[in-house]
Image: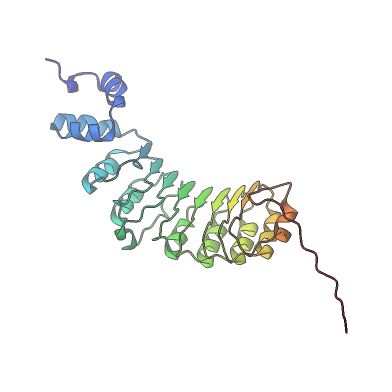
Amino acid sequence: MVHLVDLPWMDVVYAHIFCHLNLQDLFRLRCVSKELCLLVDKYFIPWQSLDLSDYVCIGPAAFGVLVQSCNNLKYVNLKKNNWLDSIQLMLLLHKHHNLAVLDLSSCNNDYMHHGSIDISKCENLTSIKLQNCTWVTERFLLNLAQCTKLQKVILADCYQVSDQAVISLCQNSGRLSHISFENLTISDQTLYAAALYCKTIQEFCLRRCLRITDAGLLSLRSLPFLTKLEVIGCVRVTERGLAPMRGKVEIDLPPKPICQPQPLSLQV
């Protein structure tokens, strides 16, 4: 009788059998015997991409196996994984310094608020999504600012983020091309910093940033590569701030007439 482990691993098992199994199947298989456990774990080694966004729950032990077995991870999607806590995230970050793309959108396990999360050693990180991550603080952003290769940062709905933290990020991330500060409490000071330090910005989302004004928006005219600007819900932004960029930049608000000041009149 021929057993699965007796077949050529690379040319037969991995290429024609394991490629049709999902993670749940693979973890069930590795529980059958020590030989099959080794077979599965070696299958994980060359993985560069890990997408766990469809899994409602993954135990700490199973996540630890993936973190330790996958030696070449560059792309990790943990979107909406409310089972993820700060300890598990730190295991991932400490093991995989070569991460390039990380999606943590809506990862809001209560234990993400406990302990410090240091991402500064991921020097090759180019893209990070943190939308609706309520645990993101100024300290985390200061660590993120050490990742100088960042090109895409999504910070939408991170209500603890302040002007100073975002300014520090801009000062250290001169390669940023895609930014979302949607629904942050930032002011024009952040826009001044972005215009000064991030000359490579192409797409800028500022939706529902209630404190920014035309003055801050006008500073973005100096960005040579800006092609898209989103400002829906910015109640203090008017056509006076948007008009100078129309024709060069795609804006998510239609043009409106600029109200001219009425001449003064005096009647007795």
Left or right of 234 on screen, residue 247: right
- The quadrant of the picture occupied by the N terminus is top left
Q: Nearer the viewer, residue 222 or 205?
A: 205
Furthest-left residue in view? 1
Q: Residue at x 77, y 63 (%)?
A: 259
Furthest-front residue in view? 268
Left or right of 209 on screen, residue 255: right
In the displayed structure, 196 sits above or below 28; it is: below
Furthest-bottom residue in view? 268
Q: Nearer the viewer, residue 122 or 254?
A: 254
Left or right of 107 on screen, residue 219: right
In the displayed structure, 37 sits above or below 200; it is: above
The number of callouts visible is 0
**Residue 212 location in percent, x, y?**
61, 64
User: Can residue 115 be seen here?
Assistant: no
- The quadrant of the picture occupied by the C terminus is bottom right
In the displayed structure, 58 sits above or below 17; it is: below
Q: Nearer the viewer, residue 76 or 148?
A: 76
**Residue 218 location in percent, x, y?**
70, 60
**Residue 220 location in percent, x, y?**
67, 56
Q: Residue at x 21, y 46 (%)?
A: 61
**Residue 264 location in percent, x, y?**
85, 75
Left or right of 218 on screen, residue 212: left
What scheme was used to colour the molecule?
rainbow
Q: Nearer the viewer, residue 202 or 198?
A: 202
User: Can residue 191 be seen here?
Assistant: yes
